[in-house]
Image (cartoon, rainbow, N blue to C red):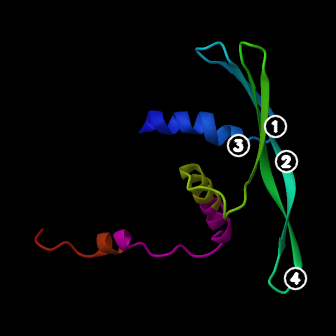
Amino acid sequence: IQRSLDTWLKEEWNPIMATQATNSTTKQSGGTVVTTKTEPTIITIKTETAEGKVIEKTTKATQITTTTQSTSGKVESKTEMIPLDDENEPFTLQKYVDRWKIYHETKAKMNEGKPKEHSHVEMMQSLPVIGK
């Protein structure tokens, strides 16, 4: 599972979440060369409501340009835009790890100066021991 997660993070998560453009080139067994360029961008999505009102929403996105060059010299290019809002974002462990870290950092800051909450473990340890 760990190897699978590491591979997924390296090949899918990191390029999509990168803050800088990345290029990768692979040569397939038939001699075809595939070049993938991934770059972050900001896009505006326009939606129209039932009443005819147009709502514009600015969101982060990743632009992926894949260029395939065959051995015969034929070049094909395909560009794909992937919005990175919460609705389109798939379940990822890293997202929840990041949120966990932020939660505990802010929780520690919020609880500074407040009396410590009583722990059930501490309460159980403070009870008298029976049978000793």
- Seen in the image, is 38 located left or right of residue 130? right
User: x and y percent of residue 116 in the render?
Assistant: 53, 73
Question: Is 90 colored magenta in this rendering?
Answer: no
Element class at badge 2: strand
Q: Answer whether labels 3 and 4 touch (C-beta < 8 Å).
A: no
Q: Is residue 129 left or right of residue 95?
A: left
Name the residue carrying label 4: 52
Give me the C-alpha separation between circle 3 and circle 4: 34 Å
CA distance for labels 3 and 1: 10 Å
N-terminal of the pair, mark 1 or mark 4, is 1
The amino acid on which the numbered mark 4 sits, given as a three-letter code, is Gly
Q: Secondary structure at mark 1?
A: loop
Q: Position of residue 60 (x, y in %)?
A: 80, 54
Marks 3 and 2 close (CB-CB < 8 Å): no
**Residue 78's disc number:** none
Q: Which residue is mark 3?
A: 16
Q: Residues within 10 Å of mark 2 (few under 14, many from 20)?
A: some
- Which one is nearer the viewer's eye here, 62 or 34? 34
Q: Which residues are magenta?
A: 103-122
Q: Amino acid at mark 1?
A: Gln
Q: Compared with residue 92, is residue 44 higher up or lower down, i.e. above or below?
A: below
Residue linked to disc 2: 41
SS category of the residue bearing label 3: helix
Q: Residue furthest bottom?
A: 51
Q: Secondary structure at mark 4?
A: loop
Residue in the foreground of this view, choosing between 89 and 76: 76
**Which labelled disc corresponds to residue 20?**
1
